[in-house]
Amino acid sequence: MLKVLLVEDEQYIAQGLSMLIDWESCGYEIAGTAYNGQEAVEFLQDTPVDLILSDIKMPVMDGITLLKKIREEELSDAFFVILSGYGDFSYAQQAIKYKCTDYILKPIQRQQLFALLEKVSALYKKQKKQETEQQKMGRAYFVRYVQALLLGRADAEALDYIQKKVSFSNKIRYIHMELEEKGESLDFQDMRTYQKVVFLNCRKYLGSEKEDLVFMDIVGRKEWLDIGFLYDVGIAAEKGMEEESYLKAFLEAIAEDLPVKVRSYVGDAVSSIEDISESFRTAILARSFHVFQVDKSILYYSEERTETSGKIINKNSIEELLKAVEENNAEKILEKGRIVYQELNQQNVDLEMTQMNMNYLLVNLAHLGLGQDESLNQDEIIQYIRSNVFENSALRGGQENFCRFMQEYGEYLGELRKNTSHGVLGCVEKEIREHYQENITLKEFSKKYFVNSAYLGQMFRKQYGISFKEYLNNYRIEKAAEYLLHTDDKIYQIADKVGYKDLDYFINKFIAVKGCTPTNYRKKVNCR
């Protein structure tokens, strides 16, 4: 039912309007009656309506003033119809100015009122349809921008859009969730159906203010049946709960009474939504390195957990082993590997803590690989480790198997080092060609390709004989020279096109590379 407010200073006219037709059969109900504009304002502050029928001439506040106040102060977005016994066109002009839906002279006839209500109903349906389409479009933009942010490809526009739509605290995690069968065998289509149900349950559980924080198929891999959650730690705090307790309750609620369970992989916390790609990366790594099948619904990437969840058994021992592997020192690997293996197999260590320590070791081995050669992507590194760990039972097949795997991985890293420069530098070259006009930095590439920025800078200078910054500047100037020769664009326009916001700075850089100003370069070449 659409709600109607009647605003009429003459009581008998107001009563007559309310009795003129069967409002309910037309899809309307009269929510209230006000006898002047001020009363209508007070009513609207507490009660939303869809249609306002108002007289013009009233004491205290007239109909035009009421309409103006409603529109300027955004008291209501209801359709507004003026009812007046005055035929003066000036009233209609004022009413139209403030988005009046219609202007009808009194006395209003039954058929006129029917026609008016049909018109408003049609406008209401059209408005709701547009709002729904806008919401879908807005959601699509939001999901696309979030996906770009998670993958480390978001620009300033995407980040700004996300920050305006959702506010976050200073601690955020990405949580990767996947569906698993509880017992009975389900085909893929059934699992897809339950995935949609769980997704909708997530939105319902979080409520209207937080429902946009969950996404379906954000990773883009059909077989994963994933649901992503931008988890703000403030959500648990609002409920007066610890993080892990909140997540347990959340996972139980979203799959309640369904023949599926949800397992979640929790990425490391970051302090800003701008850095959420790091949390996303670690959540996916947590999924990849789920070694032992402990029946646990929440699996963290690292030891960064609540105090009751346990810690790394001996972090120093693991760090020493990792250093030996990185150095490819076979004897040291054997010595440190035996120590770590024995610590991981102590009788008083439960399976859950063993799993956490194994995961910690494996993700750090992956980091070592990614730091050597980004021409191998993350999945390739993980696949190498998984095939050796699981197929050959390196971590569960005895101390010697464990140490042998570590020594082989040290040799593997050595092979990667031989091909380091070609892979990552090729990617950086491609990035410069495609994005030279944007504000790109070596620091961003080092983060994206998992290479230390100082080391990447050294690689760049060794390969090209100049720094990354000089290379980028030279590439931009060459592009600017092309624009000077092949377009009639102004100098400031060309500067902007190739990534320089400061015209004087651009001219100075152009002179340094070409030996003359952009204007003289254009004249000089065109005169040949």
Image (cartoon, rainbow, N blue to C red):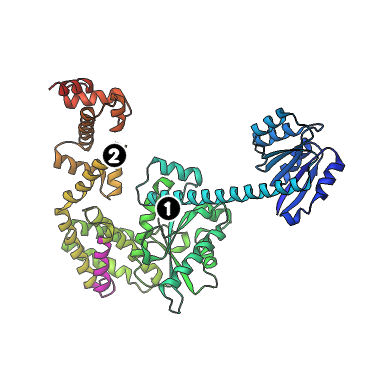
Report whether 123 appears left or right of 428: right
- Circle on res. 441: 2
Report whether 138 appears left or right of 24: left
Asked if the magenta segment contains residue 386, the reply would be yes
Label 1 is placed on what type of residue?
A: Ala
In percent of the image, x 27 and y 46: which residue is there?
446
Q: Residue furthest bottom?
A: 184
Give 231 or 478, whichever is nearer the viewer: 478
Q: Which residue is mark 1?
A: 269
- Residue span colored magenta: 380-400
Q: Quadrant of residue 399?
A: bottom left
In percent of the image, x 29 and y 36: which residue is there?
437
Give 431 or 282, whichever is nearer the viewer: 431
Label 2 is placed on what type of residue?
A: Thr
| Picture coordinates of residue 481, whole percent (x, y) | 20, 29
Q: Quadrant of residue 509?
A: top left
Q: Secondary structure at mark 2?
A: loop
Report whether 219 appears left or right of 255: left
| Picture coordinates of residue 278, whole percent (x, y) | 37, 51
**What is the distance, in whole Å, between disc 2 and disc 1 at their CAs?**
24 Å
In percent of the image, x 63 and y 49: which residue is there?
122
Give 49 or 325, whichever is nearer the viewer: 49
Q: Secondary structure at mark 1?
A: loop
